[in-house]
Image (cartoon, grey):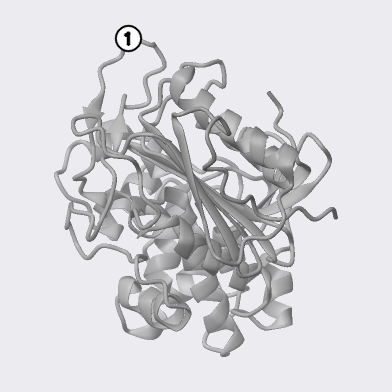
């Protein structure tokens, strides 16, 4: 796999469009000039053509890092996005949850072949569901066939807050998408169940277990799962703007910064920073969080279906094959007003994390995934796809 170093500061006059600002650590290496220019170009286009409020990216190569932004953190004040900004990471939460499950498996406290019924007796009971036929592995790689509860928005809106048990009840009020183990479909219900299993095995809250096992040992000071229905984001953060996933350009924009994330919990409720995500995935991909056998489990993939193009899915992680032929590993996440990608080389030596504080794109990318793909291409292939 080709290697490209992190981008240097280019603060000299005329080096970049004024909409883009960047910073660099004192350890900055020699640039991969074409890739750096492509990154800045995509950042500018995301704001000027895509209409997004703001975007940030942090590239790491070993201990070297480069951070850049375009647009604003707050459309009212015009403040720029900052490197320490915290944001909601959506489904990147699944990677943290899967890592905890695999650590428990490594400790012999559960097996990936254990069934949901063993740990959560009677929870999967309805519309021909059978918890005895659903393994923990099926939950983690989305082959369980259990309905995705977030697809039933009418049921979600009946209640102001949501317990994990209530989310599962919404899911099992629907038939299985396919017989367990016979297909693939992305389902947030799988990770709610995985979070419930973690709590049953450890006797501790999922938030505390993630902090104890991952955030504290790695020094991820901006990374946490909110407790209960706390709607705030602790510490410095951008505003989160949403069109409620409407695609028409004239859709109204809402501020979703304060959000009860209980309906997402283990499936997507966490908060983090670009630097923390690069550190976490660097350690995970580099084999520093799991022993080799559990590392193999995590990165054994199955084909995806009706999801993101050119991807495969492991246990809480995905691979993306870029247009240039390179394959990167990590996870993406979307929540109201915040879309993120965190991907790197298979050894974790190179990482990039991207976040936009809006959930739409009016510039022909269809949604922020097109922007993210261009930024991955620029980082790992030296050029963007635009």
Q: Is residue 275 visible?
A: yes
Q: Name the residue at 41% across, 20% down.
A: 51
The quadrant of the picture occupied by the C terminus is: top right
Residue 60: name its quadrant: bottom right
Residue 67 x %, y %: 51, 51
User: 306 or 341: nearer the eye?
Assistant: 341
Residue 112 or 42: which is nearer the viewer? 42
- Residue 58, given in percent of the width and then of the height, sits at 53, 52
In the image, what residue occupies the spot 33% across and 40% down? 80
In the picture, measured across the screen, residue 342 lies left or right of residue 266, that is right
Q: Residue furthest left?
A: 160
| Quadrant showing the N terminus | bottom right
**Picture layout, residue 374 above or below residue 365:** below
**Where is 265 relative to 253, above or below?**
below
Q: Pointer 1: what residue?
A: 250
- Where residue 198 sits in the image (x, y, percent)? 42, 75
Q: What residue occupies the far front of the structure in this picture?
A: 13
Element under disc 1: loop
Residue 52 percent coordinates (x, y): 40, 26
Image-based side of 235 in relation to 337, left or right: left
């Amino acid at each position: 796999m080709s290697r490209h170093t992190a981008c240097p500061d280019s603060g000299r006059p005329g080096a970049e469009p004024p909409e883009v600002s960047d910073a660099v650590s004192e350890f900055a290496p020699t640039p991969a000039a074409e890739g750096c220019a492509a990154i800045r170009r995509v950042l500018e286009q995301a704001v000027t053509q895509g209409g997004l409020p703001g975007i940030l990216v942090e590239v790491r190569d070993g201990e070297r890092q480069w951070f850049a932004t375009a647009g604003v953190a707050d459309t009212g004040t015009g403040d720029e996005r900052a490197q320490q900004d915290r944001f909601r990471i959506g489904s990147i939460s699944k990677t943290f949850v899967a890592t905890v499950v695999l650590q428990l498996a490594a400790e012999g406290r559960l097996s990936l072949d254990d069934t949901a019924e063993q740990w959560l007796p009677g929870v999967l009971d309805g519309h021909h569901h059978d918890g005895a036929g659903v393994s923990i592995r099926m939950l983690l790689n989305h082959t369980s066939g259990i309905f995705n509860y977030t697809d039933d928005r009418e049921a979600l809106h009946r209640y102001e807050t949501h317990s994990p048990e209530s989310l599962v009840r919404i899911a099992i009020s629907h038939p299985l998408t396919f017989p367990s183990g016979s297909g693939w479909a992305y389902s947030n219900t799988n990770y709610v169940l995985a979070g419930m299993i973690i709590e049953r095995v450890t006797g501790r809250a999922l938030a505390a277990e993630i902090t104890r096992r991952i955030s504290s040992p790695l020094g991820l000071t901006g990374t946490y799962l909110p407790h209960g229905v706390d709607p705030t984001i602790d510490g410095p953060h951008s505003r989160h703007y949403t069109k409620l996933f409407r695609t028409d350009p004239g859709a109204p924009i809402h501020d979703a910064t304060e959000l009860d994330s209980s309906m997402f919990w283990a499936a997507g409720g966490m908060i983090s920073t670009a630097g923390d995500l690069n550190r976490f995935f660097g350690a995970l991909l580099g084999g520093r969080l799991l022993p080799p056998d559990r590392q193999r489990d995590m990165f054994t993939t199955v084909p995806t279906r009706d999801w993101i193009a050119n991807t495969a899915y492991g246990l809480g992680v995905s691979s993306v094959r870029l247009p240039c032929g390179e394959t990167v590993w990590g996870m993406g996440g979307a929540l109201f007003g915040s879309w993120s990608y965190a991907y790197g080389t298979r050894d974790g030596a190179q990482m990039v994390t991207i976040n936009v504080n809006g959930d739409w794109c009016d510039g022909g990318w269809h949604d922020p995934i097109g922007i993210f793909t261009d930024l991955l291409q620029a980082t790992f292939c030296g050029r963007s796809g635009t």
